[in-house]
Amino acid sequence: MKGTILVVDDDQPLCEFLEVGLRRAGFAVASSTVPDEALKMLDTVEPDVVLADLEMRGVGGLELCERVAASRPDVPVVLMTAFGSLEAAIGAIRAGAYDFLTKPVDIDALTVALERAIQHRSLRAEVQTLRRVVEDARGFGDLLGSSAAMQAVYDLVERAAPTTASVLITGESGTGKELVARAVHRRSRRSAGPFVAVNCAAIPEALIESDLFGHVRGAFTDARGARTGLFLQAHGGALFLDEIGDLPLSLQPKLLRALQERSVRPVGSDAEVPCDVRVITATNRDLEAAVREGRFREDLFFRLAVIHVPVPPLRDRGNDVLALAQHFLTRSAKEANSSVRGLSPAAAERLLAYEWPGNVRELQNAIERAVALARTDVLNADDLPERVTGPRTNGAAAPGEAAQPTTFAPLDEVERRHILRVLEAMRGNKTVAAQVLGIDRKTLHRKLTGYAGVPRRASFRSVSPQLG
């Protein structure tokens, strides 16, 4: 069925004509010739659209529309009238009608109007669901996400923050390692002190020692004055060394000494300067492999990785993808003064299916681009970058790579994973999940009952453990 329509018209023959025609067009139909009775049917019939005549005895179409809008704002109303004047159309829109049709009504045109109204309702439900996901997601400072993978990160941050131990944060590029570092600092006893961040890969090797430890006047050519290094700038707070895996091997002993002695020696100076700093580092490299290959000192590695916080890639964060997408969409729309307010089901499906090699940073970029190029108040799949909407899916080989048979899962397993992932993203709402998947609710229920380990009355909590 395309949806359920509640037909309200005090003209009995016309009411029966519409009922027959709409059933043939694939809709479930309930009808009433008494507007007051139709209002009572809203709770029992659960219509997707109310189709009503504008001119009726007793409660007119405009009053009916207002009362439906007041009691069931999620149900769109389509009004019909034999008097298609501009004034009547304006009155209908002001009363909250979704659409306005003139009689005699053509069933084909009516079918199109009702399908649009049903799609409009599903999109509103989708937007509301995603907003609830964002509101309900456990935010941790600037971090956002309620997946089990992020809950593990939050737990580590909570336990690491009050200590004085060095923290090493690892993860792929774009996963939000600096946000994790800032969360550690904000929850520490040093939160009132400065948080100084530096990217070790962005500083030329000849300058990085001076940047970290400072220098005295005349220490080298062009050193016309003394300079306070980043260690001393972070005194009493935290120094965040991003991309620590790119720190030159020649400088690593000096960093180790600064950590052990809690003091620094500016370039060109013979004096040690005490420094009270908590060092937090991050890298997207495998430091243990670098230690084995002699590119990173083992003693420095253990000094930095007293507490290790691994940040998961976005592809392992389940429903966080849609929560983050809605968050970036809301923020981008506000900054651009755009009317975009949510994602279409097709766009949500593509976001869930994509691997996100660039992680959260790539998702943010994709949503900002889509908001800038959107032609309606809802982001559609074709607003997203081509790399997101393209045919490549999880496990597919990259250009130039040979695909292996073991790379691919059976079709029914791919379908199972996708259905469970969408259901989790919709927080267990089967109706919305079915709309996103493009199937009816009964089909979704039948598929869920066939999956091993999924209870018959599947819910958000019961489905989550099935996601990998």
Image: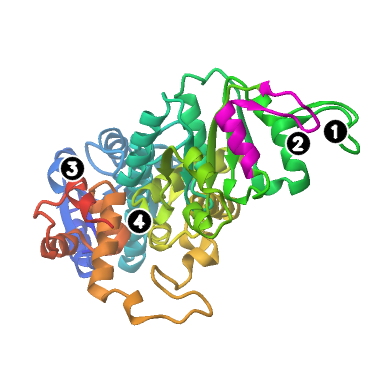
Q: Residue flagged by tag 4: what amino acid is it?
A: Gln
Q: Residue flagged by tag 2: what amino acid is it?
A: Ser
In the image, which is nearer the foreground, mark 3 or mark 2?
Answer: 2
Q: Spot the residue most to the front.
A: 270
In the image, which is nearer the foreground, mark 2 or mark 1?
Answer: 1
Whichever of callouts 2 and 1 sits on the residue coming sooner in the sequence is: 2
In the picture of the structure, the residue carrying the numbered disc 4 is 119
Whichever of callouts 1 and 3 sits on the residue coming sooner in the sequence is: 3
Residue 37 relative to residue 305: left or right: left
How much space separates mark 4 and mark 1, taking CA atoms?
A: 70 Å
Residue placed at 30% from the left, 35% from the top?
63
Q: How crowded is mark 4: few (under 14 residues within 10 Å), some or many (20 or more)?
A: some
How much space separates mark 4 and mark 2, taking CA atoms?
A: 61 Å
In the picture of the structure, the residue carrying the numbered disc 2 is 210
In the picture of the structure, the residue carrying the numbered disc 3 is 42
Whichever of callouts 3 and 4 sits on the residue coming sooner in the sequence is: 3
Q: Position of residue 208 (x, y in %)?
A: 72, 41
> What segment is highlighted magenta in the picture?
252-273
Asked if residue 249 lies in the magenta stretch, the reply is no
Q: In which quarter of the image is the N terminus?
A: bottom left
Q: Residues within 10 Å of mark 3 (few under 14, many from 20)?
A: some
Q: Residue flagged by tag 3: what amino acid is it?
A: Leu
